[in-house]
Amino acid sequence: MKISKTKRGWLFETRVGDIYIPPDRFLVNDVIWPWEYNPHHVRPWIIYNEFGALGLVWGENLQVALDAAADSEQRLMGPQELSEEDAQERVADEDEPAYLGNAGIPHDLTYVGYVELDARTFPAELVAKIVEALGEGDDTLEGV
């Protein structure tokens, strides 16, 4: 996989195509590097829908990554949220929504996809930006 910096963020050339992650959708609040003690195998995940990237989050599995995206201040999963009425209608139609995040908000994951990443493939410039954001206490790469 090739990762490159663009004027507006980071471009990931993945198995599903090119995915652009803007700095405000690149979460860094749960970063654990592959060379650190990492018994739960926390790694980066790109979450996307049919319109593009919802964001990049860190988690030990897909469920944790989706929960982190739903719980983020940036509301990365916001476009997928369902109203209570829509969720009840889906349950009645035997099409159960996914309840994500600490609040258990219903989401439609019909067109949501993911790419599991390996942080060892991140270029040095991206690693430096992540470390800088962590040092400043930021949740995203937006401020660096």
Image: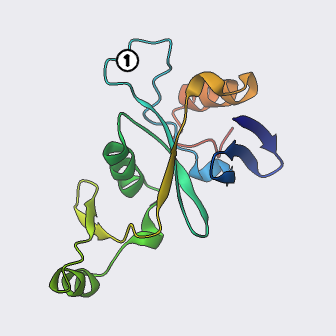
State whether residue 132 is above or below residue 76. Answer: above
Q: Under tag 1, what secondary structure? A: loop
**Residue beneath the point at 61% across and 52% down:** 24
Q: Is residue 21 visible?
A: no
**Residue beneath the point at 40% across and 29% down:** 42
- Count numbered badges in the picture: 1
Q: Which scheme is used to colour this image of the protein?
A: rainbow
Q: Indicate the position of residue 52 as horizontal and vertical percent values.
A: 62, 63
Q: Indicate the position of residue 135 as horizontal and vertical percent values.
A: 56, 25
Q: Which residue lies furthest to the right in this view?
A: 7
Q: In this view, does 39 lie to the left or right of 55?
A: left
**Residue beneath the point at 78% across and 38% down:** 4
Taking depth in this image into account, of 130 and 80 the one nearest to the observer is 80
**Which quadrant holds the C terminus?**
top right
Q: Is residue 77 left or right of residue 126?
A: left
Taking depth in this image into account, of 1 and 66 the one nearest to the observer is 1
Q: Indicate the position of residue 28 as horizontal and vertical percent values.
A: 52, 37
Q: In this view, does 68 lie to the left or right of 128?
A: left
Q: Residue furthest front?
A: 15
Q: Is residue 133 visible?
A: yes
Q: Indicate the position of residue 123 as horizontal and vertical percent values.
A: 72, 26
Taking depth in this image into account, of 52 and 36 the one nearest to the observer is 52
State whether residue 32 is above or below residue 95. Answer: above
**Which quadrant holds the N terminus?**
top right
**Residue beneath the point at 60% across and 32% down:** 133
Q: Name the residue under label 1.
A: 38
How packed mark 1 is, by other alpha carbons closer than 10 Å (few <14, some 14-19, many 20 or more), is: few
Q: Give the amino acid type for the residue marked by disc 1 in the picture.
A: Asn
State whether residue 29 is above or below residue 53. Answer: above
